[in-house]
Amino acid sequence: AAPGGRKSANRGAFSGRSAFIFAAIGSAVGLGNIWRFPAVAYDNGGGAFILPYLVALLTAGVPLLFLDYAIGHRWRGSAPLAWRRFRRWAEFIGWWQVLICVIIAVYYALIIAWAMNYTVFSVDTRWGDDPAAFFGSFTQALGGGDVTIAFDYVGPVLLTVALVWIATLVVMTLGVQNGVARTAMIFIPLLVVMFIILVVRAMLLPGAFTGLDAFFRPNWAALLNPGVWVAAYGQIFFSLSVAFGIMLTYASYLKKKTDLTGSGLVVGFSNSAFELLAGIGVFSALGFMAQAQGVEVKDVVDAGIGLAFIAFPAIIGEAPGGALIGVLFFGSLVLAGFTSLISIVEVVVAAFQDKFGLSRVAATLGVGIPLTLVSTILFPTTMGLGLLDTLDNWVNQYGIVGAALVSTIAVTYVARGLPTLRDHLNAKGSFPIGRWWYLCVGLIAPLVLGISLALTTKDLLT
Ligand code: PHE
């Protein structure tokens, strides 16, 4: 029996490097690329943001991706097991990552379900001419908003959330290669094609170039602001899905002799390329909206739920051929979100599988049924949505940053494990890791993470 887990046979495996790369890109490319990056870049220097962004990618994103890969691949386990095999006391880091994934999964599934509904609503612009009010009623089924709208959609939304979970659990039971990898190998190319059509369509809208101009216009002075740098690192961490246990778990399914570093570079740069594409698409659409409403681009910039479920419906309602834009946009959210959801649930399923020696199906059901129930039961209540919001804030502000900070410090200073991991990466990697890696993982990353924790704490206190 393996230490910390009863059985480690039959864990599943990726058929090869491209299966792994697709799965990893599937995880990285998510809602954050589409609805978070464009506004973060715009708010933090526009075209000038490219500099801190690239620095963050190269000094922390890719190095931490390598760290995740090295731990998962060298110690061959899900997050808690791999951490435990690395150092017994470090198992808690893995469970911390599992907890983060559980929380994210619950609301990620909900958002995908909303996007599925909105894909259909795009066809007849169901939200009428007040998308904000419609969204309010749509989500607040049992409280507030227009009760008739709310009531009309309780059933369909519950059904779609359940559907998202059933699809996720089916993918999980199909296993690492036939489920996780195959889904990404189908969904990611489809997503890229759909998204490119969407971006081209958006760029042809009147006003698109005002939007692009606002997006790319560099504000070099922003580079002097430390907050801009922290934002760049924050975006990179979230976007690459590092320190969630995801990349670690995926790497544990790779054959012994795999080029980890070369794969990491492919994943890192593909993710950023998609992010840039999203910025172009989103700002073209925002430029159109600003022009249509006779306001400036800065007045219509939005991110997250507001961008997707309020601003975009307005754009879809006004743009010529809006239905197509809507189907492509919400369809993209569904595809990008689903492959990310799979990766988070994989962390949880794999952890339980390893810990209790469960079969894949047993672990999937054991994890999946409670998660499905929470996700569907929480939905219709105002209290549930409030709770979700609080959890989301907590996870984003402390959970993720904290886990990343603790893991870099634990590996570098407590365990002094970086040299072993570097040797492991260099044994088969096509991209050689020099001593600069120690600097990135041991100093730059913890420093930036510490500063960003301090800044959020200060914001909360004042
Ligand atoms: N990387 C994903 C994105 O950019 C977000 C994500 C984070 C997905 C953590 C899964 C887990 O949207």
Image (cartoon, rainbow, N blue to C red):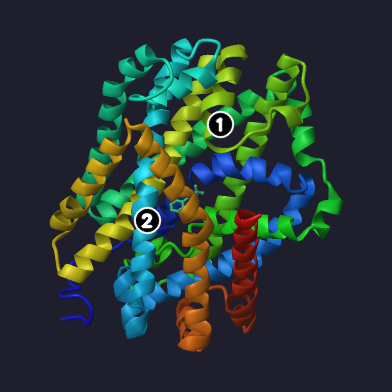
- Rendered view: 122 above or below 90: above
- In the picture, the disc for residue 101 is 2
Measured as percent of width and height from the top left, residue 153 is found at: 33, 19
- In the picture, the disc for residue 8 is none
User: Residue at 81% of width from left, 52% of height from top?
Assistant: 222
Task: Categorize mark 1 by other alpha carbons within 10 Å: few (<14), some (14-19), many (20+).
Answer: some
Question: In this view of the protein, can residue 257 be seen by the observer?
Answer: no
Question: In this view of the protein, can residue 362 be seen by the observer?
Answer: yes
Residue type at the position of mark 1: Gly
Task: Categorize mark 2 by other alpha carbons within 10 Å: few (<14), some (14-19), many (20+).
Answer: many
Residue type at the position of mark 2: Cys
Q: Which quadrant of the structure image shows residue 147? A: top left
- Rendered view: 35 above or below 360: above
- In the picture, the disc for residue 306 is 1
Measured as percent of width and height from the top left, residue 302 is found at: 63, 34
Of 255 and 51, nearer the camera is 51
In the rendered structure, which disc, 1 or 2, sits on the residue that comes first in sequence? Answer: 2
Q: Quadrant of the N terminus?
A: bottom left
Measured as percent of width and height from the top left, residue 152 is found at: 32, 15
Instruction: Judge: label 2 CB < 8 Å from ligand 1.
Output: yes
